[in-house]
Amino acid sequence: MAHLLVVESWVGSMSRLLPRAIRENGHAFTLLTRDLHHYLRSAPEGTAHPLLGARHIITADTNDIEALLPEAERLHGVLGFDGVITSCDYYLPAVARIAERLGLPGPGAEAVGDACRKDATRHVLEDAGVPGPRFAVEEEWADIARAAHGIGYPLVVKPVDLCAGMYVRRVDDEAGLSAACRELADFPLNARGQRRTPVVLLEELLDGPEVSVETVSYAGAVHVVGVTDKSVAGAPAFVETGHMFPAALTSADAEAAEQTALAALKALGLTDGVVAHTEIKLTSAGPRVVEVNPRPAGNRITELVRHVTGIDLAAACVDVALGRAPDLRHTDTGLRSAAIGFLVPGSSGTLEALDGRGTEDLPGVLEVQLAEPGRTVKAAGSNNEYLGHVMAGDPDGLGARARVETLLDGLRAGLVIR
């Protein structure tokens, strides 16, 4: 039995998949958190959050890395950790630094830090010749406006240190740019109380479909698990509305996406001890890197992969954090594709009705999760406002996405927000 240090977590899907992977592989974990109630609040009434199954739960200021490093060292001397891990993007750099301090497996702290800062990623990839959009990083309004004019409208405005598509906006003119920058400036702290970096990333708006390449890096080799597609809506925001694995691509497009992702991971130095989710735009001018995420994919993409290939990316994440070879063998699951679609609210108000009774019993359905009536609803501006999802599989080919879209149409017909 190995013992992992878990430093914080998201409270969504991966906060359940990660403890499951640890437990099913016969390991134990200690949870290190600055706010235990963050996890208590996220558990449905009458249930215990899986993270509360930790061997130990220790409170510390996980946002103060300089104080956290000696605290982790002290705990390691008492409890003995074999690896350190998190599912939350905001703590990936801290985990990498803790692993280095304790001499535990994992990717380099500099590589993780560069991947978690979108501006740093852009500079590293540009220096390495990995294709991406034209971009600029600025802080003062005059410089932002000047850089936007140089790139040309329409363009994309991004924070450099937020997740889930938060405050990522398409802007078509200077008025839209000003509004997007004001909105971002009014959000000085992220969801975990960390102060944001007040710079703005401006990027050329890329054409073409977006996909993600799921990979596992171990012992200096990067293994491609597959390519996932993505649908986006909610303009001027970029809200992910669904995914299918594997993506319905030509072999040439799949190969181009994979090779571009591999080049990005190599440039960043993410070739050992990391499960990664690299987003690629297949533009008319060729593939371009959107983002490199040094953690397993969110939005239950890891479950799509597992349903089709039998590969458990959460378990692979645990394995590489322990310095162990991950099990990446494909097994016959009976499915050729799996897809997920999200119910995205287009208006704000109170959820009055959403009836999904019987949906889970329909052919091909793998998961159904829907919000309960009475919930306060916010019109989606990121991936944080979903009202639920449906997941389905196809045993014969790449029909899972069409099946999910049909199911979502049925749910939307009964959706009432007032």
Image: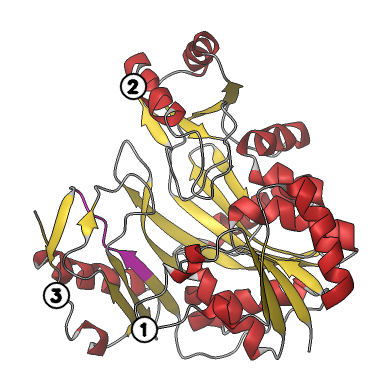
Colouring chosen for the image of the structure: secondary structure
The image shows residue 339 at horizontal and vertical percentages of: 39, 71
The image shows residue 234 at horizontal and vertical percentages of: 29, 44
Mark 1 nearby-residue class (10 Å; few <14, some 14–19, many ≥20): few
Q: Which disc, if any, is residue 391?
A: none
Would you name the residue on which mark 3 appears?
355
Marks 1/2: CA–CA distance: 46 Å
The image shows residue 283 at horizontal and vertical percentages of: 49, 41
Which residue is drawn at the image coordinates 25% and 69% (left, top)?
A: 371
Would you name the residue on which mark 2 appears?
176
Q: Answer yes or no: do the residues labelled 1 and 3 have beta carbons within 8 Å?
A: no
Q: Secondary structure at mark 2?
A: helix
Q: What amino acid is at disc 3?
A: Asp
The image shows residue 202 at horizontal and vertical percentages of: 52, 26
Would you name the residue on which mark 1 appears?
46
Task: Say above or below: 75 vs 93.
Answer: below
Residue range highlighted in magenta: 340-346
Task: For residue 366, say whether it is visible.
Answer: yes
Q: Earlier in the sequence, mark 1 or mark 2?
A: 1
